[in-house]
Amino acid sequence: MDFIKPDFSLRTVTVEMNGGVVAGLSVRYTNGLLAAAGTSGGDRRVTLTVRPEDGEKIIACSIETGCSKNEADAKTRVTAIRLHTNRGNDLYGQPESWKAAVNSEGVRGSTTFKALTMHHFDPLLDELDDARLKGFCGFGVTTSTMTYQSGIYRLAPIWGNKEVGYFPASGRPCHRRPSHCRHESELFQYNCSKDENWAAAPGHYSVSSHDFAKIRPIAPTVITGFTKLDVGSVDALRVAVSTPTVTEAGFKLSLKSHLSMTYDLSANALVLPNGRFPFQHGYVDAGQSIGGRRREQNATVSVIFSQAFTEDPTCCVWFTEISQPNTPRNLKATVQNISRLGMTIMIESWVANHQFEGAQVGWLAWPAKHKAIKAGNEYFTRGQQPWEMKWPGDPFSKDPKIFCAFNYIDFANPADAVRARVFYESATKEKVKWTAGTWEDTVMDRLGFCWIAIE
C-alpha cells in the first residue's frame, strides 16, 4: 500500500467474513480514495466509521490467525480483525459465534482451526506518539466468486502520527487553493452484456476501469447504483455494486451477482463536483441496525453527519447491495427524521413471512434548495408507459448529468427471474423522460428509483 501518504485520514474500515475467515477488507479515506483486498460478498460484514474531524482515531488493532485443523498443508488464514478508537467505538471483524481459543484451537464459522493466535498491535508500546491507524499491508486472494481460497492470508497495520486538517471528501472546498480543488461532475454508464459480452452463468463478477476526462486535483467522490438487473430465480437476489478504488485519474467499478444464474447487470456512476456545493455521502448496512437484526427483521440505521448542515438537508438513498433469495423480492430503502445533525435510514420488506439476508444502501445529503442539484423518487408499475416530467423548480442553466438507482423492488413470485431496469430516454435543461419496469413473464408490482440531476 505504497500509495498511502502521511496525511491520509481513514473514514471507514469494512471487514467481510466468510466461512470463519476474513474474506475481504476495504478502507476508505476522507479524500474519497478506497482500497480493497480479498473478495467481497461474504456471509457477515462489519464496518467502522471514524470521524477524524472530531479528533477520533483508531489507536489499537488485534489480528487473529490460524490454520484449518482438518486440512493437509493448510495455510495460515486471518480469522479475525479487531479495531479500537479513542472514542470508544470498536470493530469486531470475526464470526458471530467467535469464542476464545482453548489450547490454540477453536471453531471459526463451521471450521475447526489450530494454531490460533491473537496478535496485538499497540503503537504506544513502540513509542510512536499520537499514533493512529493509516491502513494495512499484507496479502489476499481475490476471486470472481466466493471460494474457500478467497480471503486475507497475511495482514499487519500501518501506523502514522500525522493528521490532515481538512476533509474534502465531504464536498467542502479544501483549504488549499480552492481553484485547484474545484472540479465538475461526470457521468459513466456500464452494461455487462454489452461492454463485456457476458454470457449466462451462475454468478458473475466484473471489475472495469474508467478514466476521468482529465486528472482531478484530488480524488473525487463517486456514487454508483444499479440501473438494470437480469438474474434467474434460483438463489436470487444476491447482487452488489461498488467502487473499490477511486483516485485522481479514475476509478474501478465492481458489479457482482452471487450463485444465481446471471444474464446482465448495469450500473451508472456519477462523479460529484467538488467546490460547487457542500455534500456528505456514505453507506449503511442492514447489519448496523440498532440492536442488531435477524433475517426476518427490518433494519433501522442512524446516520450522524460529520458536520452539521445549517438547515435540514435534502437526502437520497438507493441500494448498492441486496441479498434476498428464495422469498418474494420486496425491499425498500427510505429516509426519515432528517435534521441538520443526521437522519434515519430504513431498510424494509413488508409481505407476510418476509425476510432478507442483508442489504447495503448508499446515501447523499446536501443543502436544500441548492440550484445546481435536484433530486426525487419515481415509481413504475408493470406495463406503464414512459413518461415525461419537468424538473422541479426553475430549469437548469444547462443540460444536467443524471444519476438514477433502484431503491424499491416488489416482485411477488419467487419462482420468477428478477428483471428490472430504469433509464431516461431524453433529458434537457427543462425536462426528462423516464422509462422503468420489467419484461417477458416476470411479475412486478412496483419498481422505484431515486434520481439525482446535477448541472
Image (cartoon, grey):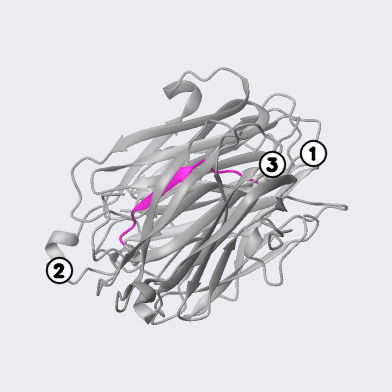
What x and y, as percent, mark residue 333? 63, 57
Residue 38 is one of the magenta-drawn residues: yes
Identify whether 94 is placed above or below 41. Answer: below
Task: Name the mark on residue 176.
Answer: 2
What's drawn in magenta, residue-wise?
31-42
Asked if residue 354 shows in the view, the reply is yes
Tell which of 340 and 383 is nearer to you: 340
Residue 50 can be seen in this image: no
Secondary element at tag 3:
loop
- Type of amino acid under label 3: Lys
Viewer-nearest residue: 93 or 186? 93
Mark 1 or mark 3: which comes first in sequence?
3
Residue type marked 2 = Arg
Residue 199 sits in which quadrant?
top right
Residue at which label 1 appears: 326
Compared with 205, 306 (above or below) is below
Residue drawn at x 41%, y 47% as measured from the top left: 138
Please state which of residues 304 and 36 is positioned toward the viewer in this rendering. 36
Q: Position of residue 143 (x, y in %)?
A: 52, 32
Calculate the distance from the C-alpha at mark 2 to the C-alpha at mark 1. Answer: 52 Å
Callout 1 secondary element: loop
Q: Please report the residue visible at 63 percent of the width from the left and 65 percent of the height from the top.
A: 288
- Residue position for label 3: 69
Q: Residues within 10 Å of mark 2 (few under 14, many from 20)?
A: few
Left or right side of 131 for 416 = right
Q: Does residue 407 lie above or below 236 as drawn?
A: below
Q: Is residue 444 left or right of residue 421?
A: right
